[in-house]
Image (tube, helix red, strand yellow):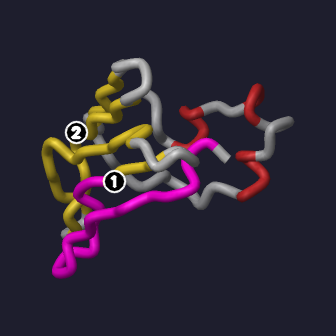
Amino acid sequence: MDNPRAIVWIDTEFLIMLKMESYNDLGNLGTTMNILALGEFEGKLTADVMLATNHSDGSTTTITIVEQHRPDAEISQDTFLPESIPAFDAAMWGFAN
């Protein structure tokens, strides 16, 4: 297992993760995920910008949520099976212009 131990900071009022640290099997810090900006979707607090850092190689990834909306119709669980992914059409669910 790459990161057998994790510590998660959660805002107790809004029940949203603010930060996460993962430690490797030697107890060394492996990765962190920090919430850099919060937003709102359907009246609930959401993470708008997240920074993931791999401390073993120093690499980082920034994840920015630009827009959120509900699909036009319910999406079946089967849509996300590995064999279904190549045929996925976002426009079918109202996610593409």
Magenta-tinted stretch:
2-19
Location of residue 24 in the rendering, given as x and y in whole percent from the top left corner? 52, 45
Q: Is residue 82 above or below residue 10?
A: above
Side of 37 where 18 appears, left or right: right
Q: Which dot marks residue 20? A: 1
Side of 71 where 33 appears, left or right: left
User: Magenta stretch containing residue 7, yes or no?
Assistant: yes
Secondary structure found at label 1: strand
Name the residue rendered at 49%, 53% in the picture: 72
Which amino acid is tagged 2?
Val
Name the residue rendered at 29%, 28% in the picture: 62
Side of 93 where 87 appears, left or right: right
Secondary structure found at label 2: strand
Location of residue 7 in the rendering, given as x and y in whole percent from the top left corner? 37, 61
Q: Which dot marks residue 49? A: 2
Alpha-carbon span between mark 2 and mark 1:
14 Å
Name the residue rendered at 37%, 29% in the picture: 55
Location of residue 11 in the rendering, given as x and y in whole percent from the top left corner? 20, 71
Which amino acid is tagged 1?
Met
